[in-house]
Image (cartoon, rainbow, N blue to C red):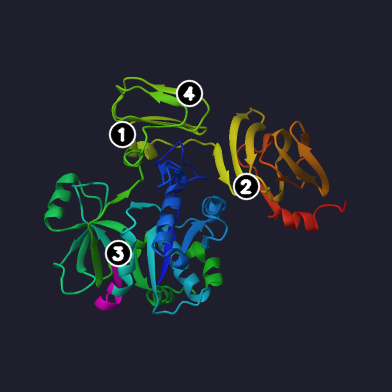
Amino acid sequence: MKLVLLSGGSGKRLWPLSNDARSKQFLKVLEDEDQRRVSMVQRVWGQLEQSGLAESSLIATSQSQVEMMHSQLGEQVPLIIEPERRDTFAAIALSAVYLYSQKGASLDEVAIVLPVDPYVETRFFDTVKDLEATLHASQAEMALIGIQPTYASSKYGYIVPSSKPDASVQPIYRTVERFVEKPDEEKAQALMSQNALWNSGVFAFRIGYMTDLLERKGFPIQYEELAKQYHLLPKISFDYEVIERMDNIVVIPYDGYWKDLGTWNTLTEEMNSNQLGRGMVSPDSINTHLINETDMPVSIIGVSNVVVAVSPDGILVTDKQASPRVKDFIDYDQEPMFEERQWGYSRVLDYQKYEDGSCVVTKRALIRQNRSFGYQLNVHREESWTVIRGTGEFVLNGRFMSVKAGSTLHIPMQSLHSIRAITELEIIVIQTGRDADHNQVMELYRTWDEVAEHAIYKR
């Protein structure tokens, strides 16, 4: 069987730490067994490795998340890259076709799809392994994992079974009668009395089922061809387009710990400390959390049941129960102020727009040792760099020079350039240009080895 982890998200529910460049699964707010800060995707990938499933797993993601995925999981993690964001049906269709036409999977092979960021015990993945056998034993079209509810939640969808499990069949499964999408608490309580389960978003199907479905819809089942027609696939969730139209579905109940950390109130419940970053929370601030990514100290005194989240993108102060509503209020027209990249990270220090349409952006960038930018040019902006720490190698239009703390560099608009850190390198970048909203960047080479071979004048 093959596992496909879906990595998407627009970054609004955990604003201001998350944004279009850094969705919730990449936020390093959890701790691993060694008390190191890890993100949700790092935690899940570690659990897959412990369960022996990492080698058969792939991650479906958008081009905008590729660098961050490589930064957090390493460059060897296998990715299926979506040409654009088109909801889960399109992502899963492309993934099934990729497994079939690019990886040589047979039509009878089972694909298991799961979110990239569930907060679960490692034993949850033993139940994931049971999906393949359940699909074959039941002869169902789809096999799901349903979570045994611990309270009447209105945050989750519910799976209503039509029969009790047969304890003589292993693994134990039940047939599915219907689905209920996020009911109110009163209805959720009634569903629990019917032995309904929370929908975990984990399901399994034969790859041939998806290829047949695509062919009936008139789409190709070769990866390269489907990628070209990706924009024509329905922009709809897999649940609505496929699962809820099926008649023959089974579900495996899971009674262990499971949580969707999609909002500030649920995420802070799993944090080992009520404070991350600079500042303080007074002892009489009960059930209050501070998450601060800036160098400015933040103090919270005598305020209970709130989350205060601070990043270069903004400041959020919210009652915990009201925190899921943040996505309804965040509509700020600005570039991401913090970006984690494969080479390191950059933080916007100042962003100014002027009436004549010009702009000035000041950033602080850290480049990790032996990492480098791609060989690229800015279409609409020129840049001035000042090296404030470390040593490195810089190239501008093929001309090479060594740089160190104190070096200043001017990069004219539409000039090819790159830099490599010999030691960890920090630079202040000042960009000026006419395009205030989008700085188009064109990349000629991605690695420093390519730059050294093709772009640097022989010294």
C-alpha gap between disc 1 and disc 4: 22 Å
Q: What crowding class fits label 1: few (fewer than 14 Cα within 10 Å), some (14-19), or many (20 or more)?
A: many
Identity, as a three-letter code, of the amino acid under mark 4: Pro
Q: Which mark is residue 297?
A: 4
Q: Are marks 4 and 3 in contact (CB under 8 Å)?
A: no
- For label 2, the residue is 343
- For label 3, the residue is 127
Highlighted magenta segment, given as a residue range: 134-143
In this orientation, which residue lies closer to the viewer: 364 or 328? 364
C-alpha gap between disc 1 and disc 3: 32 Å
Q: What crowding class fits label 2: few (fewer than 14 Cα within 10 Å), some (14-19), or many (20 or more)?
A: many
Q: What crowding class fits label 3: few (fewer than 14 Cα within 10 Å), some (14-19), or many (20 or more)?
A: some
The answer to which quarter of the image holds residue 299 is top left
Q: Nearer the viewer, mark 1 or mark 2?
A: 2
C-alpha gap between disc 3 and disc 2: 37 Å
**Left or right: 276 as drawn, with respect to 393:** left
The answer to which quarter of the image holds residue 424 is top right
- For label 1, the residue is 320
Please provide percent x and percent y for residue 92.
Answer: 42, 65
**Left or right: 231 as drawn, with respect to 234:** right
